[in-house]
Image (cartoon, helix red, strand yellow):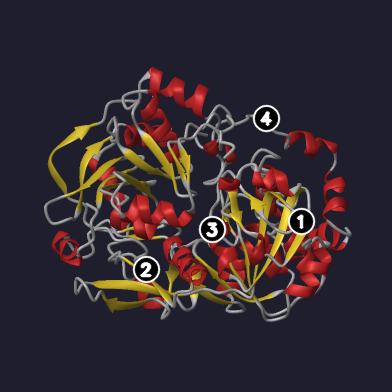
Amino acid sequence: MTKLCSLSEAINQFVQDGDTVYAAGFTHLIPFAAGHEIIRQGRKNLVLARATPDLIYDQMVAAGCAKKVIFSYIGNPGVGSLRIIREELEAGRLEWEEYSHYGMISRLQAGASGLPFFPMKPTAAGDLERSNPQYRRVIDPYSGQEVVTVPALNPEVAIVHVQRADAAGNAHIWGIIGEQKEAAFAAKHVILTAEEIVDEEIIRSDPNRTLIPEFIVDAVCHVPYCAHPSYTQGYYDRDNAFYLDWDKVTESREAVQAWLDEWVFGVKDRAAYWEKLGAETHDRLKVAPLMSTPVNYGAY
Amino acid sequence: MTFTAAELMTVNAARLLRDGDTVFVGVGLPNLACNLARRTHAPGLVMIYEAGVIGARPARLPLSIGDPTLVSGANAVCSMYDIFSLYLQRGNVDVGFLGGAQIDRFGNINATVIGDYGRPKTRLPGSGGSMEIAAWANRCYIITPHQKRRFPEKVDFRTSAGFLGGRAERAASGVRGGGPQAVVTNLGILEPDETGELVLTALHPGISVDQARENTGWALRSHGTIRITEPPTAEELRILHEELDPQGIHLK
């Protein structure tokens, strides 16, 4: 069954005010186009969960979409501070809930597995565990030793960008796979965005590469270049210059608003955004091919 | 000949790595140090990145922890859950590199907040992977500029465990890793003594003990004879500047 629809339709149907949203992707495949569409549609009071909020949540917080962030690292990767989120936290205008990467990912793992919580070995550091009451300790009934636990995270919606998917939502992902699969299985609804929509036969030609099966997917959106300024392995490079520029843009709220006006509200969709970036940027982000050796599944 | 702080820290950190080590690498100077070690004395170094990449052979300088160059040509790629559980928690990581805004007398690290957690004066990025790396890697190394504000007697927030209040406290906690083994700065090297307190064990050429003391927030002691580090060699500098960071992004 085809679930193809526009990203605008998918956001309209599956992201509501107040929802907990997990836009997946550790540095790789971050669905910026979906973040921008949520901003354009004026969603409010969202709980934005991501291990690394990255620029996508900095932009959504700047646009007033969020009441809370759940995270494990709020930096601008490779650059420094995520200024908007940082200022909002320091000013007490944004709620937050904080974990280490492992704690954050374990929450998704529990959510994705249908478990109420997930255990981890203690780390001895202590202060984050004391600061966030969602961290608890229980006794391992087998050894009698304490383990640290975090509760399941089951977002209302996960947004997952992939290299290619069929119209039903079976998705191939390669490169850094971060928490894509766990976020999709943990969420109540899944919006898939894909660089390419391919025939079912292409998916079936390499089933080990399918991380997300169709029956957990609600919407499939064909959104080339969805991840810019992050990247899609094999399709286009990370726009590191953009990450550096954002650090400058966010020195003033006026500049941030001007940026949102031009690059989010000023474009209809991702195709218009990509076009607006221009040929120089397109060329700069091109990547030369490096093919894997095909594997033989055997014709049984 | 004089060397920059970045050159001194990178070269001396690289020399701490052993051939065959499995290293949890971070971006910036740790990445340079690991790649330098692999091109010199540790060709069997296995570089693991927290984004889930194992045995990376980056063809260019990775500018973020999830740079695509880490993936192309790597041994394996796995999920974040796998990297932190199968690799780190299970005990398959020899070395972790850490940094932070504050490192205290017992090697505990603050990467979270300056001031009160609930009402942050300065909000920092937070743990990322460092809480677990500090606990579970067999050995940890810290690379940081040597400044008084970075070396307080006690950190404002303990993001990652060093020796807590001393070696006995870390041992009693039951965490599997050996804790911080060395802090490499632009002035020299600090290492934990038998109590877990960081003491001065080496100085870079031309640096005095007083300089190190003046830039440390606790009464920095020295242990035995203070070694003078070997200056970076021409070959080490060539690899760093020509092969690893030709644009001078981290070495400027």
Res B26 → quadrant: top left
Q: Amino acid at mark 1?
A: Ala
> Quick check: can you spot residue B185?
yes
Residue holding disc 3: A179
Residue holding disc 4: A289
Q: Depth-wise, is mark 3 or mark 2 nearer the camera?
A: 3
Residue holding disc 1: A167
Quadrant position of the N terminus of chain A in the picture = bottom right
Q: How far is disc 4 from disc 3 in space, using C-alphas?
A: 25 Å
- Quick check: do tags 4 and 1 share a chain? yes
User: Label 1 near label 4: C-beta < 8 Å?
Assistant: no
Q: Amino acid at mark 2?
A: Phe
Residue A153 screen position, x and y as percent: 52, 73
Element class at badge 2:
loop
Q: Residue furthest top?
A: B234
Front in this rendered view, residue A79 or A118 = A118
Q: Depth-wise, is mark 1 or mark 2 nearer the camera?
A: 1
Q: Residues within 10 Å of mark 4 (few under 14, many from 20)?
A: few
